[in-house]
Amino acid sequence: MLVSLIYLSWSFFFFFFFFFFFFFPLYLIIYNHVIFVDYTIYSHNSFNLSYILYLDWLSMVFISVVMFVSSMVIFYSYMYMGCYSYSFIRFFFIILFFIFSMLLMIISPSMISIMLGWDGLGLVSYCLVIYYMPLSSYLSGMITCLTNRIGDFGLLMSSVWLISYGSWHFIFYLDYYNLNIFYLLIFSCFTKSAQFPFSSWLPMAMSAPTPVSSLVHSSTLVTAGVYLIIRFYSNLFFFNNLLIYLSLITVLFFSFCANYEYDLKKIIALSTLSQLGLMMLSIFIGLPDFCFFHLISHAMFKSLMFLCSGIYIYYMNDNQDIRYMGCVSMLMPLTSSCFNISNICLCGIPFLSGFYSKDLIFESFSLMSFSFFFYFFFYLTIGLTCLYSFRLFYYSMIKSFSMICFMSFYDYFSEMKFSVLFLTLISIFFGSFFNWVLNLNLYFVFLPFIMKIITLLIILFGLFISYELVCIKMFLFNFFFFFLFGNMIYLSSYFFFFYYFIYLKFSLYSYSLINWGEYYGFFGLLNMSMLLNKFFYMYMSNSLIFLISVMVFYFFFFI
């Protein structure tokens, strides 16, 4: 009883601060104010160590999003994670440490504070990915940790470089910095936000509990890199072709991957990667305000999508394969309705949250001067988003159900459903409300009629192509692209391949994705220690013979 009371208290605590941090930016926007607090920690002669709080509407809104999603996830985890186990307490304290690390990174422009929050986010992400502690989670956590440490190098080097300017307060010297410092910062943000070519860790991080995926790997941690670039936005990397094309590759590649994946959580993770690529792309083409709008609206409906998928997994005996999920809408109508709302928000259907942010980005992009092929691939991302969204809808809602998990389904109102319903309301109305509050509708975009409706036409075309691929069963097309982009092994896909090729594929898959952690980890160290023990045992048993053998070997090969 005490544990449940603690959880509910913290959930309502974060929910209260969500309202405070959400409505306080309205005051800052109306009066155009910024709160700046400089606290001197230590001062000696010319040396001054201070900590700065920089509170503007940008940081306040992002903090409110973190608080709201954290509140809903903690309330959701009360039932999902099991509130009477010791591991549940461990999970709770890790979540609190994550929120503290996010606040450190958001509220201060000092590189030291950002570095502390950045490393705290990486540590918490590793602890949450290995939470269930099987071998696969250990390997996923190791890849997550190593990839994020690569990015920490860029942030650390930029902090060292700033010493030459006499201050770690990055935001004061944006017009005077060397371009290399910005590139180091962007390098760190690319790894944290899982941009190409550092994207492998996010799908593997789906071995974490589903509430973690909702809070950490969809709405807050992975958007930390995007937020940091918006915060330190400068014209120095405005319209950089390399960064633009890397972001476009991220959007296209992972949209294709999501169309041929069968793991429910990995499909949502790949869609998160494609949306993160869209955010980065909108920054580098000069639309940071619209990028931030899409960031916070995406955080709402993507966390809702993860929480709904967690309910499916919870009542399906931990099954994540969408091929066993048919007719969920008949068995769980409330959860399915919320899941479909988040799905159509992702597509950008009018007039939900995703529409207002994505429509602004695409219409503003239409006024810019790029090549025809760049326009083609940029608008292709809309169709691909609709394609994998409808595919997920078909497999989970329309396709006939599997008897494997049939008896596990029942839909009653629980603590998990409360969080889902609240996030659903926010996902419906947040986009229009935020658009009116920030007066983003004052950005007048004048386009011809055909260009104005081209986004809606591509959405409809993407839904039609998805229907053709999924329902009419274009087998050879699906079969070919499955080997290029698919990940979850399914035996019927190997119908035309020989037995030995199948065996070879499974052997290579097992060695490359499963056994490398054993080979380079504990068992590799154990084997090396056993070899060293044999070596020293031979030396101690036959020291004279062994010494002569070593001398002869050295004489023939090194002299």
Image (cartoon, grey):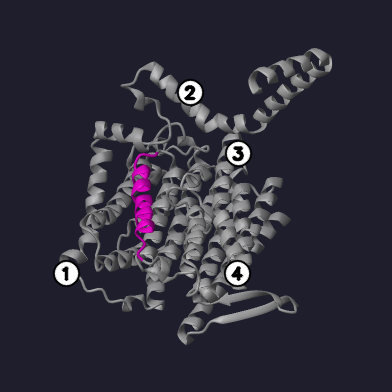
Q: Is residue 435 above or below residue 180?
A: below
Name the residue nearer the viewer: 23 or 327: 23
Residue at image location 39% in from the left, 20% down from the top: 501
Q: Residue at the location (39% across, 17% down)?
A: 499
Mark with earlier residue (4, 2): 4
Residue highlighted by disc 1: 448
Q: Which is more toward the observer, 353 or 204? A: 204
Alpha carbon of mark 3 to alpha carbon of mark 1: how far? 54 Å
Q: Are marks 3 and 2 in contact (CB under 8 Å)?
A: no
Q: Secondary structure under badge 3?
A: helix
Residue at position x 56%, y 65% in the image: 67
Spatial CA distance of label 1 from label 4 is 51 Å
Mark 1 burial class by Cα count in 10 Å: few <14, some 14-19, many 20+:
few
Q: Is residue 205 left or right of residue 237?
A: right
* Residue 16 falls inside the magenta stretch: no
Image coords of residue 365 (percent x, y): 28, 65
Mark closer to the chain start, 3 or 2: 3
Which residue is denoted by mark 3 in the rendering?
Answer: 138
Q: Residue 352: x, y in percent? A: 35, 64
Residue range (magenta)? 239-261
Does the CB distance between marks 3 and 4 fall below 8 Å? no
Residue 265, labelled with which disc?
A: none
Query: Based on the displayed image, in which of its 4 quarters is residue 160 positioned?
Result: bottom right
Residue identified by numbered label 4: 164
**Which dot marks residue 507?**
2
Task: Depth check: give the residue in front, 47 or 329.
Answer: 47
Q: What kind of element bears circle 4?
A: helix
Of marks 3 and 4, the one in the foreground: 4
Q: Position of residue 252 (x, y in %)?
A: 33, 49
Q: Are the two marked residues, 1 and 4, in contact with CB atoms closer than 8 angstroms?
A: no
Q: Amino acid at mark 3?
A: Tyr
